[in-house]
Each structure stands twice: as C-alpha cells, then as structure tokens.
Amino acid sequence: MPLGCGTMSRCSFKSALQDSQHKTKVTILKSTNRAQTSHTTMGSEGTAKINNNTIQRKPRFLCLHGFRTSAAILKKQIFDKWPSQVVEKLDFVFIDAPSPCQGKSEVEGIFDPPYYEWYQFNKDLKEYQNFDKCLAYIEECMIKHGPFDGLLGFSQGAMISGALPGLQDKGVGLTNVPKIKYLIIIGGAKLQNKPLAEKAYSSAITCPSIHFLGEQDYLKKYGMELLESFVHPVVIHHPRGHSIPRFDEKGLESMISFIEKVQTEISK
C-alpha cells in the first residue's frame, strides 16, 4: 500500500519531489519522552542458536516506521510478509515517531490509529519542522533501548535512516550513542533540505546497507539516487509499489546473506 512521507498526499509528495529535483514472542513496552508517551514494540528475542547450538546475540535494529503510521503497523507489515528465516535472525525494536499525526493518514481504515510522524515540511520539501527534535528523540530511544547495531526504516523512516550515518559523522545528531553500523532501507530517498543534505551525503556512506526498490514505487527514482551515496550497497528489487515487500527467491538469498554478514561481524 502507498504511504506518504510528509505533510501531503502521496501524489503531492511525488510532484513536489520532482519539482525540487528539477529546480535544483512480541512485547509492548511503555516508553516516555519529554513530549509524549509512545510505544516501543519489541519484535523478537535477542539471542539465537548459531552453529552447533552456540548462543549468540542477534543483530539489534531500531525500526523507524513510515509517515503517519506507527510502530505497531510497521511491525505487523514486516512480520506478516517476511519469513521466519529473516525475522528470527534479527532483534527488532519498533518505536513510534515523536509527533502525533497532524493530518489524515493514508492507512486510515486499513490500520488502527494512533498514527505518528517523524517531522514536518513545507510544500517544496526544502524546509523542515521539528527535525532536530526528531533526532534528539531517536537518540533518546537508542540510549534507553540500545545499544543497536543498525537502523531499519520504511518511507519517511527510511529517509531518516539513510541520512543518519552522515549526519552523525558531521556531529549533527546521535552524538551520545555509538556509530550506526548497518542499515536496512525500504522505500527510501534523500532528504531534500539543502543544509541537511549537504551534511548527510557530502561523504560516501560506508556502513553496510541493504536497500529495497519497488518497480512501481513513486520513490524509486529517488531511492536510486540515494544508492549513489553508499559504498557497495546491496539492492533488492521487487515488483510492488511503496510498501513492505515479500521476498522472491533471489531477494531472500540477498537478505539472508546480508544478515549473516552482520551476524559474523558483531560476533567477532
């Protein structure tokens, strides 16, 4: 299903992106921040039996949902569509965004509220509101529920996740937590705010990453542009639109290989 990434509809978001380019077990826990009470959804237990029943820690990922959805929605999308070979190998922590939904959600009538958004922006996507608060909130969650090995993001959450390694390196955010080491990006794109983009993408992003690109995704073009900022990104192509996809055989092999690489590296 299509999910927007800002304060406008999917079609308006697509049009504004194009214009700007031309112009230039499962547990629910309560987590309290300064602004609201949010939910943190723990996806799977944090240890797994690897190689002759040796117990090892699973890679731990903080998961950032799409615009005007929620932690519970992203968790359901992933656990409904991804097989046990994937979800049982990762330790997911799903968090709600810091801002309550400020308009109609495109998933209304499909998934139950409440809905949340990470930040807001104006029509041409160049001015953001509450982005600094968003970064502070994510850092707060990482301190409280971490440490984390990486980030998983979908849609607006993917845009943030793809930018955070560069922003962290430039001291813009996440200065009190360990470096982000791995990324899972689903339906992502670059930030359009120029000052933030200059900091986020001015240097090549070297952390291992895996990117999902949908053939019918209105963000596909911009997801491909995001790939240019990464060193040796792994890409999974799927035939769907702006959604959490199921795996075909090739995609599943790529995902399992990526997870095994992460598992090997964090076990050293």
Image (cartoon, rainbow, N blue to C red):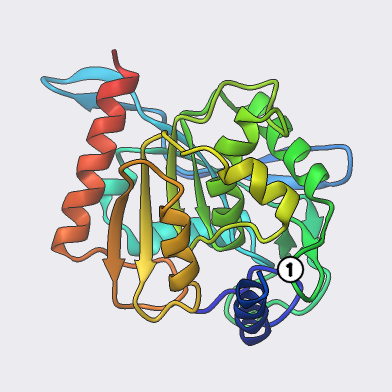
For residue 49, above or below residue 157: above
For residue 133, above or below residue 153: above
Left or right: residue 202 versus residue 53 is right
Q: Is residue 85 visible?
A: no
Instruction: Report x, y in % for residue 107.
Output: 61, 77
Q: Pick the residue in front: 264 or 114.
A: 264
Task: Identify the residue at horizontal 79%, vertical 76% (top origin).
Answer: 123
Left or right: residue 205 versus residue 215 is right
Residue denoted by label 1: 125
Task: Identify the residue at horizontal 26%, vertical 41% (top origin).
Answer: 258
For residue 156, above or below residue 203: below
Left or right: residue 103 versus residue 252 is right
Q: Pick the residue in front: 92 or 221.
A: 221
Dividing the image into 4 quarters, which one contains the C terminus? top left
Residue 118 figure quarter: bottom right
Q: Pick the residue in front: 48 or 164.
A: 164
Instruction: Report x, y in % for residue 65.
Output: 58, 57
Instruction: Report x, y in % for residue 215.
Output: 34, 77
As drawn, the residue found furthest toward the left would be: 52
Task: Identify the residue at horizontal 54%, vertical 55% (top origin).
Answer: 158
The local secondary structure at tag 1 comes to loop
Q: How many marks?
A: 1
Q: Is residue 148 visible?
A: yes
Task: Identify the residue at horizontal 70%, vertical 28% (top origin).
Answer: 171
As drawn, the residue found furthest toward the top would be: 268
Name the kind of residue labelled 1 in the image. Answer: Leu
The 10 Å Cα crowd at callout 1, few under 14, some 14 to 19, many 20 or more, is some
